[in-house]
Amino acid sequence: MADISAAALSVARSRLAERGAQVEWVVGDARHLRLREPVDLWHDRAVFHFLTESADQDAYLSTLRANLAPGGHVVLATFAQTGPTRCSGLLVQRYDVAGLVERVGAGFELVRGFERRHVTPAGAPQDFTHVVLRRLPADV
């Protein structure tokens, strides 16, 4: 499991108790992360939409490609076009399914895409776009 926050990883590790020993815990920035070996699943709920600059998005997508095994899946959730324009005081990038697939780019096929309304603990609705993509083998 990777996160930019050591504190967040510590909380997750404590919640897993003994099972936490089976997880590799990595503190790192998703724009520059290099894992020991490719993973079969990349799950991002609400990181990519904070990357509003093309260079940051490109760095993240390069990291994704470097760390996701061919045939592996990426589950990506961002704010939808009807979602908020800011979160935690920061500007966000919003996507629909087609726009998110296009931004991720070649080498992936869409397995599933949908939008869903999430209600925060404070009761505020936030619309999210979700995609599940499969990384194609390099020779396809």
Image: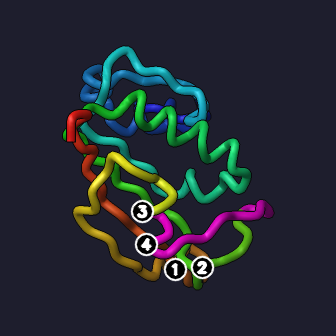
Real-space CA distance between mark 4 and mark 2, rounded to the nearest whole angstrom: 16 Å
> Residue 79 or 68: which is nearer the viewer?
68
Give the residue at mark 2: 83
Q: Are marks 1 and 3 in contact (CB under 8 Å)?
A: no
Marks 2 and 3 sit apart, C-alpha to C-alpha, by 18 Å
- Amino acid type, label 3: Val
| Residue at the disc numbered 4 | 98
**Residue at numbered disc 1:** 127
**What is the x, y in percent for residue 7?**
59, 33
Residue 11: image location, x then y, percent: 49, 37
Marks 2 and 3, the one that precedes in the sequence: 2
Amino acid found under the numbered disc labelled 4: Ala
Q: Which residues are magenta?
A: 88-101
Relative vertical location of residue 69 with respect to residue 44 in this rendering, above or below = above
Residue 97 at what x, y percent from top left? 42, 72
Is the residue under label 2 in contact with that under label 4 (CB below 8 Å)?
Answer: no
Residue 101: mark in rendering: 3
Q: Quadrant of the N terminus?
A: top left
Left or right, residue 50 beside residue 95: right
User: Does the rendering let one see residue 87?
Assistant: yes
Q: Quadrant of the C terminus?
A: top left
Give the crowd class for mark 1: few <14, some 14-19, many >=20 residues within 10 Å: some
Reading the chain from its start, which is encountered first: label 4 or label 2?
2
The amino acid on which the numbered mark 2 sits, given as a three-letter code, is: Gly
Question: Disc 2, disc 1: CB below 8 Å?
Answer: yes
Q: Secondary structure at mark 1?
A: strand
Q: Nearer the viewer, residue 91 or 120?
A: 91
Residues under labels 1 and 4: Cα distance? Answer: 16 Å
Q: Earlier in the sequence, mark 1 or mark 4?
A: 4
Q: Say which label, 2 or 1, has the lower sequence index.
A: 2
